[in-house]
Amino acid sequence: MHLTRITYCSEIVDNIGSEELSDILDVSRRNNDKNAVTGVLLFNSDFFLQCLEGSRAAVNSVYCRICCDKRHHNVQIMTYDEVSRRLFSGWGMAYLPWTETTRKIISQYSIGAEFNPYQMSAQSAMELLNQLGQLLQKDQE
Ligand SMILES: Cc1cc2nc3c(=O)[nH]c(=O)nc-3n(C[C@H](O)[C@H](O)[C@H](O)COP(=O)(O)O)c2cc1C
């Protein structure tokens, strides 16, 4: 298997509510578990940053579905790589709430005061995801 990781950011459409966000997480977990896809979804009221990892076929297939989703727009790929290990193994789709710890980590990689993945370099996005992956692993131990 060619273990593949994609990271993209997008803008949330205006009229989306917390119920829809929680639906996205539920559907993601259900589908991703079936397809051995793992990852994390970060969002504030304006933006998504998502990392998806799995077989090349599975990652491409879910990414194509996500691109057509009307709940966001301006989808931009930040990274696409073949990788040797997963950062989010064990998480069909991890979600990290805005705690003091996550805020601190995210602010290290953000240019402005608010989370805006469009302003991040691909390298910053990867470093951020690495740190969040480590935080999740630690919480699980
Ligand atoms: C920001 C965002 C992230 C999403 N992430 C995933 C995902 O990781 N996996 C997934 O299956 N669907 C994801 N979705 C939902 C898909 O766009 C699509 O609605 C869903 O895959 C359809 O699944 P269904 O055919 O089982 O209803 C995401 C949608 C958005 C807007």
Image (cartoon, rainbow, N blue to C red):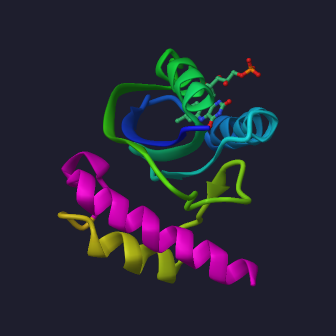
Quadrant of the frame with the C terminus? bottom right
Query: Where 102 sits versus 94, above or below?
Result: below
Residue 13 horizontal/vertical position (percent): 44, 28
Query: Where 33 sits versus 97, above or below?
Result: above
Main secondary structure along the magenta-highlighted residues: helix
Residue 117 belongs to magenta span: yes
* Front position in the image: 105 or 92: 92
Residue 135 horizontal/vertical position (percent): 56, 78
Task: Please give left or right for residue 1 compared with residue 141 in the image.
Answer: left
Task: Please give left or right for residue 58 compared with residue 8 in the image.
Answer: right
Query: Where 25 sits versus 125, above or below?
Result: above
Residue drawn at (50%, 15%) of the image: 68
Q: Quadrant of ligand 1?
A: top right
Q: Where, by quadrant of the figure, is residue 89 drawn?
A: bottom right
* Front position in the image: 104 or 124: 124
Find the residue positioned furthest to the front.
Answer: 1
Task: Please give left or right for residue 58 compared with residue 125 in the image.
Answer: right
Residue 47 horizontal/vertical position (percent): 39, 44
Quadrant of the frame with the N terminus? top right
Residue drawn at (34%, 67%) of the image: 127
Residue drawn at (28%, 75%) of the image: 108
Residue 26 belongs to magenta span: no
The residue segment tinted magenta is 114-141
User: How many discs appear?
Assistant: 0
* Front position in the image: 25 or 127: 127
Residue drawn at (59%, 65%) of the image: 97
Query: Where 102 sits versus 23, above or below?
Result: below
Residue 54 horizontal/vertical position (percent): 61, 41
